[in-house]
Image (tube, grey):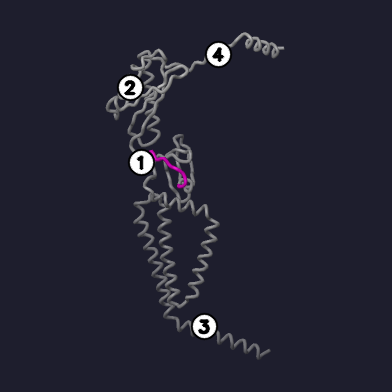
Amino acid sequence: MKEELKSTTEILIDKLESWWTLFIRNLPNIAVAIIVLLISYFASRFVFKTTLRLIKGRIQQKSVAKLIARVVSVVTVLLGLFLALSVMNLGDSISGLLAGAGISGIVIGLALQGTLSNTISGIVLSFRKNIRLGNWVETTGYAGEVIDIALNYLILKEADNNIVIIPNKTIMENPIKNYSLTTRMRVTVECGVGYESDLEKVEYITKEVITDSFEQIENAENVEFYFTEFGGSSINFLCRFWIDAENALEKLKAKSKAIKEIKKAFAAENINIPFPIRTLKLDNQTLNIAQTEKEAVEA
């Protein structure tokens, strides 16, 4: 028993001595590796600040800018770690780390597929010039002002002050209409006049009203006017014109103003805008059936 204990102790001491000898032998490499790690750490902080300063002008979203800068910083630290392991002749450890990182990346990618997709879409949206904070956009059935583009979602404020949160992946996969990319919008007004109206006069008055109501319309020739159909109780027409606007609210205000001014002008010229009229024809048999049903209900 004593001999076995002595043998075990000798083996342990020999092992510790071999480790100490290996440590002393590799002490210069360890010192260089520590210096490399320290340099990579301070370099990562410098890279983080520099990257953040460079991309802050192109990306308005602070969260996205910090994410990109942090990714670049982490890459710098990882490069320093691999260099340190190489200095210490730990090639097997580097291979193990790379293999583990690859497997971990696959597992994490499968588990967070939706989240990663939204995050990547948020980064892409941040670099796109056709959508910015303050733009009035319409997408996936919603229209409003872009008030934030976060890592995972885009936030719209609709005209009724409701907040809509849309995943970035949905924005990337669907068409988007940006009203703020152009400074002009076309307003369409539809109306109808009575059959007894002078159609030439109706067209003239409508064009003059629109021209006088909006300063950006230089003359009546810039106003489109078309009679569209013989309606049930009126002859309907379509009037279109362009205004200087960057969001749908300005377009809505212009349409409202045009409707009010057209109504005033038509009333002043005794031009009738008729109500919808429906004529019902009832024969004696229908009236008798209705009277019988009424008497049955009262009984």
Instruction: From the top left corner, tell me how far across and down residue 154 is, in percent.
Output: 45, 46
Q: Badge 1 local density, few (<14 within 10 Å), some, or many (20+)?
A: some
For the residues bearing labels 4 and 2, Cβ distance under 8 angstroms: no
Q: In 3D space, how far apart are the residues under numbered discs 3 and 4 (Cα atoms)?
A: 107 Å
| Residue lying at 36% horizontally and 37% vertically, measured from the top left | 246
* In this view, the mark in front (1 or 4): 4
Asked if residue 178 lies in the magenta stretch, the reply is yes
> Exactly how many numbered labels are in the figure?
4
Distance from the alpha carbon under mark 4 to that under mark 2? 37 Å
- Looking at marks 1 and 4 on the same chain, the residue that comes earlier in the sequence is marked by 1
- Ranked by sequence position, the earlier of labels 3 and 4 is 3
Which structural element holds mark 2? helix
Residue 242: numbered disc: none
* Foreground residue among 116 and 36: 116
Q: Is residue 128 magenta?
A: no
Q: Which residues are magenta?
A: 172-180
Residue of label 3: 19
At a point 39% along the width and 25% down the height, the residue shown is 238
Tag nearer the camera, 4 or 2: 4
Question: Which dot, 3 or 4, sits closer to the camera?
Answer: 4
Tell me which corner region of the image, top left, top right, bottom left or bottom right, holds residue 67. bottom left
How busy is the neighbourhood of tag 2: few (under 14 within 10 Å), some, or many (20 plus)?
some
Using the numbered discs, state the Cα–Cα distance from disc 1 to disc 3 in whole angstroms: 69 Å
Helix, strand or loop for disc 1: helix
Determine crowd level at label 3: few under 14, some 14-19, many 20+ residues with C-alpha closer than 10 A. Answer: few
Residues marked 1 and 3 touching at CB (< 8 Å): no
Q: Which residue is mark 1?
A: 181
Which residue was labeled with disc 4? Answer: 280
Q: Amino acid at mark 1?
A: Leu
Local SS, label 4: loop
In this figure, which residue is indicated by the disc labeled 2?
209
Badge 2 amino acid? Val
